[in-house]
Image (cartoon, rainbow, N blue to C red):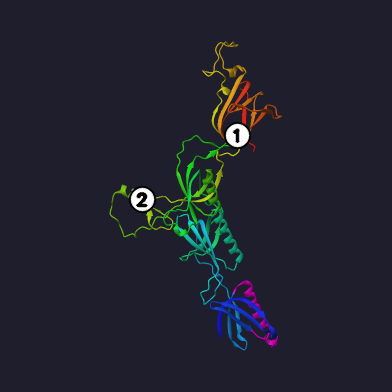
């Protein structure tokens, strides 16, 4: 008997019940036969079962093992068995690891030979949060085929979205640990949640390219490095900024090429847009220290404390230490309009002095006015109508803006010295005006017969 392993690619039934089974082996195709399906009823079920096994193996692309002997019509099948390349054993020890998926390769094994058969598998390259790269192996022929396909889909989705993923892998010391389970999403963690979602920062993209720190060339262009100059966060409907002091800083982040965050960074760099990013800081593991050789001589405590505070950074793929901080792992990007608010202007200067105090700009008091108490009072207390003004200069995204004024009737509005038509909104005390604006403009609103304690409200927003 001769034993052969391979894949069935053809099953043919000819005259006199002659069955031909062609098997693709490591050395080429081999044709086996099952003779006389119609003869010898005592072995009829045996021959039909052999045909069924060969047919099922062909339909599912499963490997077969055939024992054959020379017969009158060629190599006649004496025994046929469907064999499996599945990973049937669960690893005895597992550990968790996480990082940014930068590359996925899917390998199909088309040859079965000897006893060293290997299943189809996916190779996943991950940039860990410790700054090192790791290669994981995802078997695609586990008995739960749909689970393996879903895991691969989750990994591909995380790569496209630039999300941090967590993996449960075998801890057997192998070069490529086997993936057992995966967690995806912003709350990815091995315990089902409660993971750190990272830090956020706002700013402008200065650079975006594939010139990476030393040691990352092994990733074959799967990563990009971006440099972002931070800026204060924006607050409020109009995109205002907190007046607190702020010191801009440079933030370097690594992002997977081809992902959605990479495309958003590219758009921000091209159109000079403001971005808000979410990232995970890389915490490099210090290199192992020398073995303990017993008590050490006493030295300078201050010098020892200073050496303990030194931080050694290890670049991706490097073993040598350097003093440069590692780039962070980018997981999310949010684009903002050039002026931070697409629908509202950003006011740079507002002058409402005449609106709050009145025409007197000295001490707020009017001398010589007859009052019942014979004491001078401000216009606010006397409720004397006067002509008030509101002035504001700001930046507008290009578009058509609506000015909605709540206050006394008869208000006039000018933009850069040009008067606008004012319309009645149909609501008491509310008038509106329209203007097509873009860039820097100054708005001046004149309110006749204004009394200091009268409510005044201005709402400006883009309608198109």
Q: How far is the residue under mark 1 from the one under mark 2?
A: 59 Å
Check disc 1 and report the residue beneath it: 437
Is 46 situated above or below 300? below
Residue at 61%, 72% in the rendered image: 61
Q: Name the image quarter holding residue 383.
A: top right
Q: Indicate whether residue 38 is drawn in magenta.
A: yes
Q: In this view, which residue lies farthest toward the right?
A: 426
Image quarter of the N terminus: bottom right
Question: Which percent across, then down, holds residue 175?
Answer: 46, 65
Question: Which percent across, then down, holds residue 394?
Answer: 55, 32
Q: Which mark is residue 308?
A: 2
- Specify the segment rendered in magenta: 34-62
Q: Name the image quarter holding residue 427.
A: top right
Image quarter of the C terminus: top right
Is 157 situated above or below 27? above
In-front residue for pair 231/462? 462
Residue at 53%, 71% in the rendered image: 118
Question: Which percent across, then down, holds residue 398?
Answer: 59, 37
Q: Secondary structure at mark 2?
A: helix
Q: Indicate whether residue 265 is drawn in magenta.
A: no
């Amino acid at each position: 008997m001769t034993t052969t392993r391979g894949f069935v690619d053809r099953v043919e039934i000819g005259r006199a019940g002659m069955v031909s089974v062609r098997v693709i082996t490591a050395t080429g195709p081999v044709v086996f036969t099952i003779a006389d399906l119609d003869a010898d009823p005592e072995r009829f079920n045996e021959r039909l079962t052999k045909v069924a096994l060969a047919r099922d193996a062909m339909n599912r692309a499963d490997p077969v093992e055939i024992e054959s002997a020379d017969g009158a019509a060629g190599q006649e099948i004496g025994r046929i068995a469907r064999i499996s390349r599945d990973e049937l054993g669960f690893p005895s020890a597992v550990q968790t690891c996480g990082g940014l998926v930068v590359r996925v390769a899917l390998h199909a094994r088309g040859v079965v030979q000897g006893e060293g058969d290997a299943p189809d598998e996916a190779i996943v390259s991950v940039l860990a949060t410790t700054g090192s790269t790791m290669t994981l192996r995802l078997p695609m022929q586990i008995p739960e085929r749909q689970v393996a396909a879903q895991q691969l889909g989750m990994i591909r989705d995380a790569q496209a979205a630039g999300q941090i993923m967590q993996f449960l892998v075998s801890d057997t010391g192998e070069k490529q640990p086997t993936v057992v389970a995966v967690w995806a999403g912003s709350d990815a963690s091995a315990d089902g949640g409660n993971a750190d979602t990272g830090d956020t920062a706002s700013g402008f993209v200065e650079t975006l390219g594939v010139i990476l720190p030393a040691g990352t060339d092994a990733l074959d262009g799967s990563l990009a490095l971006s440099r972002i100059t931070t800026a204060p966060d924006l607050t409020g409907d109009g995109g205002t900024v907190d007046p607190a002091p702020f010191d801009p800083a440079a933030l370097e982040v690594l992002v997977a090429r081809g992902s959605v965050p990479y495309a958003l960074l590219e758009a921000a760099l091209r159109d000079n847009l403001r971005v808000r990013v979410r990232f995970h800081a890389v915490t490099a593991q210090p290199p192992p220290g020398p073995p303990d050789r017993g008590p050490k001589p006493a030295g300078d405590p201050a010098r020892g404390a200073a050496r303990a505070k030194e931080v050694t950074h290890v670049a991706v793929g490097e073993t040598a230490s350097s003093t440069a901080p590692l780039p962070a792992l980018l997981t999310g990007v949010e684009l903002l309009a050039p002026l931070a608010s697409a629908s509202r202007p950003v006011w740079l200067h507002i002058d409402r002095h005449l609106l709050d105090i009145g025409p007197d700009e000295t001490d707020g008091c009017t001398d010589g006015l007859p009052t019942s108490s014979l004491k001078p009072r401000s216009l606010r207390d006397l409720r004397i109508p006067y002509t008030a003004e509101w002035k504001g200069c700001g930046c507008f995204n290009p578009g058509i803006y609506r000015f909605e004024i709540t206050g006394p009737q008869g208000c006039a509005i000018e933009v850069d010295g040009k008067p606008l038509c004012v319309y009645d909104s149909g609501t008491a005390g509310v008038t509106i005006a329209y203007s097509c604006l873009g860039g820097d403009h100054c708005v001046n609103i004149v309110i006749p017969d204004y009394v200091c304690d009268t409510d005044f409200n201005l709402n400006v927003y883009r309608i198109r």
